[in-house]
Amino acid sequence: MTLNPSIINAVEKLGYRVTSGDVATQAGIEVNIAQRELLALASEAGGHLQVAESGEIAFAFPQNFKAILRNKYWQLKLKDGWEKIWKVLFYLIRISFGIILIASILLILVAIVAILVVINSSQDNESSGGNDGGGFIPVGWLIPDWWWFVSWDNNNYQRYENYNTDDKKQMNFLEAVFSFMFGDGNPNYNLEERRWQTIGKVIRNQQGSIIAEQITPYLDEIGSLVAQEYEDYMLPILTRFDGKPEVSPDGQLIYHFPELQTTAQQSEPQLITTYLKERKWRFSLATSGQILGAIGLGSVNLIGALMLGSLLKTPEIAGYLTGFLGFVQFIYPILLIYGIGFLTIPLIRYFWIQGKNNKINERNTMRQKRANILAQGGSILKKKLNYARQFAKKMVIHQDNLAYTTETDLLEQEIEE
């Protein structure tokens, strides 16, 4: 059996006592799926059914139900273990690009110094009576103060947002190199989840009865003018949350969702945004100092690689391309490709992000306009809202209005009554 992690997380966040409507709203999934998954989860994790006198059903779970599941399913144990291992592996991957960059610079500079020493020695042997140190170039002139780049802004790191966990973490310079090259992930990776969660909360806040104009600020495309007139875009919402359309005496459509009108917890209306706002892509979450440091090191690396390539072609070192210099000559194409890619990948990504953000701005503006239309209202909207309120209701399944629960024996319940 495969357990749905979103169901497990929703039950935990909602306080271990839920209805299918609670879980569907919290997880942004279909009501029917939530109902089926909750039944399976209750069976596997020692949960109980609580049936209200009205026939509505709530699910109660022990607070240690996740530990019960881990003990029963090796897949969950393996998943928990892999998540811990992956955090370490991914961190090593992130810092590896910074380590490779510094190692590349050091390797290139040492190779350049070694080649210059060979060239100077050859010139000294060919010239008689010359100055022994006439052609020597001090190593300090060739090796920049690379540690200055590494320690740039070392004591002034900013806090940054990790889009994968929504946690705040501190980024060191080696992580900043990875961020400079590849960014920090898709800021809208959970956009669909956010969309359905918000739509579910809108329905809940309106006590299970809404009009289409209350939903459009959270959708992308709503179809042609004909589709908008018939409100075809509401079909996926009706399917997901088991809703039913109703027609007002004026011929206007409203929608009510019986499953979302029942809850296991008394709660106030939740705060939600007036429209679904996509987050803009950012080039990097590293500080400006860290980005400048990465650019500086990348430039040093590329210039050094080009110098090294030129020096490797000098005839004076043809007989010395063995050992260390032979190894450098062998991997030189890799060093050059890495040096070029280190600066060109972020450049390409920068222009790609500009295009993505332009489209995000357009979608956000479109959804905001729909929210403004709803806020401005109008006689037609007011009539639809008034009709929708006739179907609005909220039922809370309390412990004192239960007709039956699987937590105790039926005979015991009858005796207590």
Image (tube, rainbow, N blue to C red):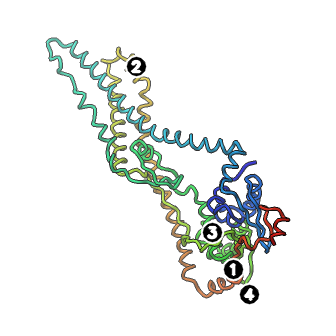
Location of residue 133 (image quadrant): top left
Are circles 4 and 1 on residues that touch, CB within 8 Å? no
* C-alpha distance separating marks 2 and 4: 88 Å
Q: Which residue is mark 2?
A: 326
Give the residue drawn at x 56%, y 79%.
373
Q: Which residue occupies the foreground of this view, 406 or 83?
A: 406
Are circles 2 and 4 on residues that touch, CB within 8 Å? no
Are circles 2 and 3 on residues that touch, CB within 8 Å? no
Q: Earlier in the sequence, mark 4 or mark 1?
A: 4
Q: Which residue is mark 1?
A: 392
Choose mark 3 or mark 1, whichever is in front: 1
Q: Amino acid at mark 1?
A: Ala
Q: Which residue is mark 3?
A: 199
Q: Amino acid at mark 2?
A: Gly
The local crowd at label 3, few if under 14, some if 14 to 19, many if 20 or more residues have their Cα within 10 Å, is: many
Q: Which residue occupies the foreground of this view, 284 or 61?
A: 61
Name the spot of residue 94 as percent of width and height, x first. 47, 41
The local crowd at label 4, few if under 14, some if 14 to 19, many if 20 or more residues have their Cα within 10 Å, is: few
